[in-house]
Image (cartoon, coloured by chain):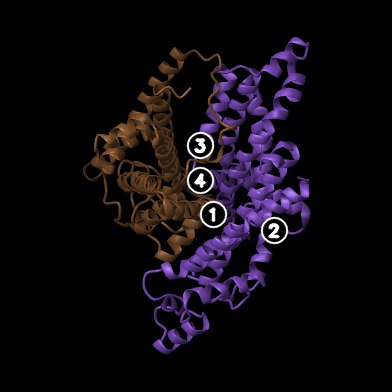
Amino acid sequence: MTAPVEAAVPAGGAPPPPGPAPAVRVRRGGRVKLAIGLTVVGLYVLVALLAPVLRPHDPLAQNVAAALQGPSGAYPLGTDELGRDVLSRLMSATGLDLTVALLATVLPCLLGTVLGLLAGYAGGWLDAVVMRVSDLLQAFPTYILMIALVFVLGPGVRSLLIAFTAVGWVVYARLIRGEVARIRGSEYIVAAVTAGLGATRIMVRHVLPNTLKQTLVYLTSDVVFAVTALAAFSFLGFGVQQPTPEWGSMTAAAQAYLTEVPRLTVLPGLVISVLAFGFALLGDGLQDRMGRR
Amino acid sequence: MSRYGFVLRRGISLVPLLLGIVALVMLLLDLSPGDPARLVAGPRAPQAQVDQVRHRLGLDLPVWQRYLHYVGDVLTGHLGTSFKTGRAVGAQIAEQLPVTLAITASGVLLALAMSVPLAVLAARRPDRLADHLVRGFGVLGIGLPTFWVAIMAIRLVALPTGWFPVAGFGEGAAEHARALVLPALVVALGIAAPMIRSLRSTMMELADAEFVRAARTLGFGGFGLVRRFQLRNAVPPLVTVTAAQAGYALFGTVVVEVAFGMPGMGLGLVTAAGTRDFPLVQGYTLVFAVLAVLLYLLSDIVTSIIDPRVRITA
């Protein structure tokens, strides 16, 4: 998981054109985006928390006699090929998809931050090893490597999270290492060292705060990718396994009934897309408010 | 430095990276929890067979010897044989490679074809309606899951119109081309957003550049100005983003091949993973990684042709 644009475009390519866009308007736009994004994500969190209470049926209960039914009072969104209630399954999947997507975003960030700090501060062979490994990982097509890793570790959520972490830390490590290198010689760090502050304290109090903004930018774009990538891995059969309800694997199972019951494929995809847009708006709004442009 | 010298040097500088990739792919086997030989032989194989597999794969050798053997095998094109079919991995991949290359390449070209006009349009009047529409389109590409877009394209376009095959790659050039349309579109939509965003901001930056302002005072205007002064200078960063996005397009291709049932490396990889066919998965991973490295080399070459300064500074 990398944030492709920010990671890929060297200094010359990307931002930030001052442009004629009035700052005030951007701020206000940011607020609207932020509000919509927060509402969407908040709704999903609410559904995830309340799913056990709200869902009309047991998401795993099969009723083959009632398979592939259209929406009705008993089954508001109809039933799937095994007669399971689609609404209940979509709701139950929310908690799993949200949790895994968030973990798949946060874990690489944590590992990358630690490795970046160590590499930047310690330098020497540790730095060399971390940087060479990250070169190697960046050269690999990210998701292909993740497929290989999940294959080796066996499909499932745990393997997926390991794969996300093993591949996704690179961007964060490079960011933090760069920051450490940049401020190493600066006066206030020298002052802090002279004052007798320990390395850990300098790192946590003086280096990390400087990287917070950029880290947040990466995090908010990574979480959008994590939502769709997680579903994609499950769709391909590497992620969450049947019969556990998960949006991607629900789509994969329903593809066989695409002609007769398109609803079964349309719904999970919509649910994923709306969450992804929610996170995208949230991230955009945050960046606007922080004054990206 | 001459153009060929530059390309040669770039190519040579990639050798350590390629060696690292080969090492990583080889070590994948060692990452598996438990005994790799057991993994390869299958869970129900008798111990004697497991030991035999261990010896056959050279897993009883020290790791550096295994590495040298593996590098030698890869260099001579021996990627092992499939457990399930007994076919040579290299032969199978060679058969599927054209399909994957065709989908990825047409997807990337299509993404370029949509990005350039859209970004130019958006950059002409920032923060106006067209700009917002274009940016909205970009967000659409990021938020919609590729596998779902692919299935929707089958349901909403291929099935009702009958213009495009619902699955497969067909026979002969005409059918191939028809089969490529929807997959390429889906791949393109998935990767276009960062290209649009990057080109848009480059164009906006260039609109303020001194030489563009000078050209404007000299009487250049309209599309001629955009094309001759802005677009030409926006190409090198666009190439860089495109190369990075082409790397992502490889995964889009995997997803699209599975959704459309196209006989490429992506479908092969997913199928091989499903049957726990280790040499095949290893082979696919290696070839995909090498493709990505070649992409970067290609983007370096293209950049050096467009912008000769690169050859001096790099």
Q: Is label 4 on the same chain as label 3?
A: no
Badge 4: chain ID? B
Colour of chain A as rendered? brown
Q: Amino acid at mark 1?
A: Phe
Please determine whether, in this image, residue A67 is positioned above or below residue B152. Answer: below
First along the sequence among labels 1 and 3: 3
The tag on residue A140 is: 1
Q: Amino acid at mark 3?
A: Glu
Q: According to the image, label 3 marks what residue?
A: A6
The tag on residue B148 is: 4
Chain shaded purple: B
Q: Is label 4 on the same chain as label 2?
A: yes
First along the sequence among labels 4 and 2: 2
Left or right position of B234 against B156:
right
> Contact (CB < 8 A) between labels 4 and 3?
no
Give the class, few, some or many, for how many residues have Cα within 10 Å of label 3's Cα (few <14, many ≥20).
many
Mark 4 → mark 2, Cα distance in angstroms: 24 Å
User: Which one is closest to the eye, mark 2 or mark 3?
Assistant: 3
Callout 2 secondary element: helix
Callout 1 secondary element: loop
What x and y, as percent, mark residue B242?
63, 41
User: Which one is closest to the eye, mark 4 or mark 3?
Assistant: 3
Residue appearing at x 59%, y 32% in the figure? A12
Q: According to the image, label 2 marks what residue?
A: B98
Q: Amino acid at mark 4?
A: Trp
> Contact (CB < 8 A) between labels 1 and 4?
no
Mark 4 → mark 3, Cα distance in angstroms: 26 Å
Badge 2: chain ID? B
Residue appearing at x 76%, y 24% in the figure? B228
Residue found at the very far left of the displayed protein = A53
> Contact (CB < 8 A) between labels 1 and 3?
no
